[in-house]
Amino acid sequence: MRPRTTAKRAPARQRKQAPRRYDRFRLINGNHDFQKAVPDGAVEYSVRLRKGGTLAYFNYDLAKEMGLIAGDHPKKMNHRLSQTVLNTFGIQIINEYDAMHHTPIPKKTMKPNTFMATRYLQLQHPDKTGRTSGDGRSIWNGQISYRGTTWDVSSCGTGATCLSPAAAIHKKFFKTGDPFVNYGCGYAELDDGMAAALLSEIFYRNAIATERTLAVIAYPKGFSINVRTGTNLLRPSHLFRYLKQGDLEGLRSAVDYFIARQASNGHWSKHGSRKKNYVYLAEYIAKRFAQVTAKFESDYLFVWLDWDGDNILMDGGIIDYGSVRQFGLYHHEYRFDDTDRWSTTIPEQKRKARYIVQTFLQLSDFLVTSNKKPIQHFSRHKLLKVFDQEFEHHLCQHLLYKIGLNESHREYLLNNHHDLVKKFKGVFSYFEKAKSQRGPHRVLDGYTWDAIYCVRDILRELPVHLFGKQSVMTPELFMETIASSYASKQDRRLTEAKTRKIHEFQKRYWTLVQQTAKAFKTTERKMLLELGMRSSIINQYDRITGNAILEVTAKILRERKKLSFDETQKVIQDFIQYQKMQPDPEKKKAMNTLNSVEDRQSQQVMHKIMGLVRENRESL
């Protein structure tokens, strides 16, 4: 009898791991609660698989948050995951044109469920009541729940729907991919999709509410499908459609659906009755839109708000990145030329947001009283004053944040020395809003009047100077620090009035430092040291702009032909992390990203795209 032996177990690193499963992607199958809750809120389309796609971008962090991949999944692509993404999202609708022309579609390419294109109000449609408008080239892939949170998933570039502006204007259905129709071909562009993926994730990392991109699928001729997600992708325009039509029951069903989703996700608590929920909705919108609009103005975010509530989510999150930009300076005169109309400017966004709030007051009252009153009836409503106060409060708060003051410092100053904050804000605005002697002029996609001073530079450099030199900047040094490349010789000239403003700026700044140091029982030098460290991150020199993101995207798309998918993803992830401008421990990692890419070629790409950011740091 042989002695019993025990086989030695191979080390963990030598054991072959079972292939990972991606079964949860199957839950994203066209089914969505909105379809049942709001029966006439969407047009249903059958879909088929679209061949020829390759994965261009995948958001591993977001996929983990949604429970689509395991929390320990490496940020590496494999064939099974790539094919799962392509089979889930690489689809095209079978639209009205296909039905009329009997387009041959193999049954094996058909998906079993229908997918919805939602209806909502859009100002570019001839009908201003939302009867013909909505998702013109997008469908909602469905929803998925994970750890108490439900996510909406939609895709742009999946085919021409009957809700596109072209279908409404020409009163006909269009073939998907028709190259001769504007606003109606149904396809999306790869460069737009990748730019949106980069910019939206940078915004998200900087605590700006936004939809996020889960994946981008590239197709021949520069087309793509761009997969977007959010915990609630409803827009105000989804509700305004029913309000404009005077459809009380339709409005009630849409609002009840929105409230139920917000409550189930834990974003707000129910308030006992339908009427109390409707009243609270108006209060929520008034405060929330004041907060996000102040953020937009403070961070120079051009979002193009308008009365239809189309280009914004219900929580004030940014959506549809086609015209979204972040400016390097306060280019507050810039307008986008959209062929048949001009956009709003950054400061006008407040007025548009205020009108959206006023519309919600009308909407809330309609739900409570069953009587739709004219919009003018709410022009003096108390919640509009709440909006104004909340806007100003958050604008001041953001300014103190950019100075480098922490949360405790900011709250102290706003509660105890609001007058000092307002005085500094006044002289800060003098420099922030200063415009070039050149005057207004055309740019590629609109017109602008250049801002000339980079106030972020002075906020970054002033505490360092005060700490090191222990004296204020001379007017000459101050002007040299704050003047941008847009400032001409005449713009830089130190007039008597401008010199007084320079002295006032530093005096008001120093007063805030003194008051804060005194209240928190520290020295002024220690305060300056903290401000210098925090402000250097918040007001980072190489900060992304709209023009920069376009050039960076073009560079990445060119270089991805030479790099592997994983190498390209690593460059993208490091670039996004480097653009996180919040003074926290994670930022220390981001500051080293320029040297974190192991492959020399990838490292070269990273350095090149950072060069593009620096070249465009002051632009639109």
Image (cartoon, grey):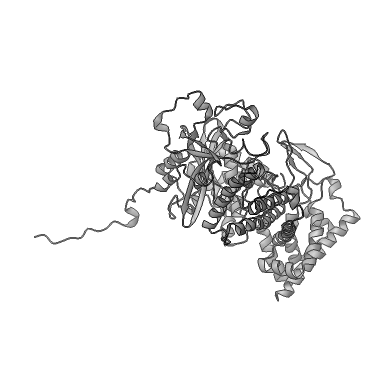
Q: Position of residue 613 (x, y in %)?
A: 65, 46
In front: 194, or 527?
194
Seen at 61% across and 25% down, the residue is 180
Up the image or down, 412 lies above or below 142; here it is below
In front: 28, or 486?
28
Residue 538 figure quarter: bottom right
Seen at 56% across and 52% down, the residue is 256
In front: 447, or 6?
447
Image quarter of the C terminus: top right
Q: Position of residue 93 (x, y in %)?
A: 50, 33
Residue located farthest toward the right when viewing the structure as drawn:
496
Up the image or down, 226 lies above or below 516; here it is above
Q: Looking at the image, can residue 594 be seen?
A: no
Q: Position of residue 194 (x, y in %)?
A: 57, 41
Residue located farthest toward the top when viewing the structure as drawn:
101
Q: Looking at the image, can residue 259 be seen?
A: yes
Residue 128 figure quarter: top right
Seen at 75% across and 61% down, the residue is 462
Residue located farthest toward the bottom when viewing the structure as drawn:
521
Number of numbered markers: 0
Left or right? Give the position of 16 relative to 320: left
Residue 4 figure quarter: bottom left
In front: 141, or 568?
141
Left or right? Give the position of 474 relative to 237: right
Up the image or down, 402 lies above or below 63; here it is below
Image quarter of the N terminus: bottom left
